[in-house]
Image: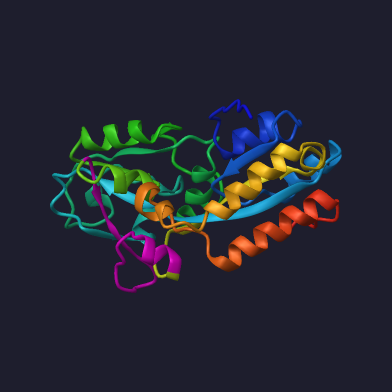
């Protein structure tokens, strides 16, 4: 079995290769949108959804930012919203430095961008214009590590494999206690920026390609293994998730799958 992998972000992957029918599978850090489902159907196929893992999206600052250990969703919204777009840290909190923000985040084609803007700003796709967007997590970390007054956000899987490069902040919401990003917090839902991770398969391709079915079945059955947490940094699938994914695979290969959204 051979693979041709492209890295285009969740939204870019849906738009450029999956919806047109040019790829069998699309990984996504957000659920597929209803309009994307409809466009798949307009192109003659049903997308089959697999909920494969969970992540704790991690807010990071420079290691020298000793004046900040935690931040609220409300302050994050103020910082990143295009409606407020404060120039300095002190504009948000008078106890913070009177220094300009240097902001790094996911590119607009990324599912991480879609998730962050909806969860933090309150509207998908809404964000201030003066941030540096990229599909490369290492570039976000490099940017944040290079400026004491920088901020960014990263998958916990990247942070946990590079813990000395940047500083992770605990996050609070609605006046609650700050919660550190962790696999346990993501699994329990206590961490405010816990998010699901998916992949989607083209039903027609599933029915046509036995090796694709076998690969996805292998993928699903590996997704609850402990190494997903220890080596990768995601919350593994639960046994219930594995069973549901196998059911989705079986229904997809039989042509009677109904999208969950």
Tell me the residue at 53%/52% (across/down): 222
- Residue 70 visible here: yes
Which image quadrant: the N terminus?
Answer: top right
Going by the image, does 24 lie left or right of 175?
right
Instruction: Specify whether residue 179 is painted magenta.
Output: yes
Tell me the residue at 84%/52% (across/down): 254
Which image quadrant: the C terminus?
Answer: bottom right
The part of the image, by quadrant, that contains residue 6 is: top right
Rendered position, 199 above or below 241: above
Tell me the residue at 79%/44% (across/down): 203
In this view, the residue in front, 113 or 17, is: 17
Rendered position, 81 above or below 209: below
The residue sitting at the bottom extreme is: 176
In this view, the residue in front, 8 or 67, is: 8
Tell me the residue at 38%/36% (across/down): 137
Instruction: Specify whether residue 183 is painted magenta.
Output: yes
The part of the image, by quadrant, that contains residue 179 is: bottom left
Going by the image, does 211 lie left or right of 134?
right
State the extent of the magenta-drawn residues as a range: 165-187
Could you tell me residue 234's position as x and y percent? 43, 53
């Amino acid at each position: 079995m051979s693979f041709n992998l492209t890295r285009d972000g969740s939204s870019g992957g849906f738009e450029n290769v999956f919806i047109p029918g040019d790829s069998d599978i699309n990984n996504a850090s957000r659920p597929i949108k209803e309009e994307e489902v409809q466009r798949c159907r307009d192109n003659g196929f049903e997308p089959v959804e697999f909920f494969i893992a969970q992540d704790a999206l991690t807010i990071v600052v420079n290691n020298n930012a000793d004046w900040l250990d935690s931040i609220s969703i409300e302050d994050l919204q103020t910082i990143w919203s295009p409606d407020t777009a404060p120039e300095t840290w002190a504009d948000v909190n008078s106890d913070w430095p009177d220094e300009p923000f240097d902001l790094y985040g996911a590119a607009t084609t990324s599912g991480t961008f879609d998730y962050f803007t909806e969860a933090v700003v309150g509207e998908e796709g809404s964000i201030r214009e003066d941030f540096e967007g990229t599909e490369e997590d290492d570039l976000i970390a490099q940017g944040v590590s290079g400026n004491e007054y920088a901020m960014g956000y990263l998958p916990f899987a990247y942070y946990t494999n590079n813990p000395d490069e940047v500083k992770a902040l605990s996050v609070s919401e609605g006046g609650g206690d700050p919660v550190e990003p962790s696999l346990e917090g993501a699994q329990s839902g206590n961490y405010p920026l816990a998010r699901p991770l998916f992949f989607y398969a083209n039903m027609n391709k599933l029915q046509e390609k036995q090796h694709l079915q076998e690969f996805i079945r292998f993928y699903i059955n590996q997704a609850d293994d402990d190494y997903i947490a220890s080596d990768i940094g995601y919350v593994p699938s639960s046994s219930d998730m594995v069973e549901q994914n196998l059911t989705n695979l079986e229904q997809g290969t039989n042509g009677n799958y109904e999208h969950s959204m």
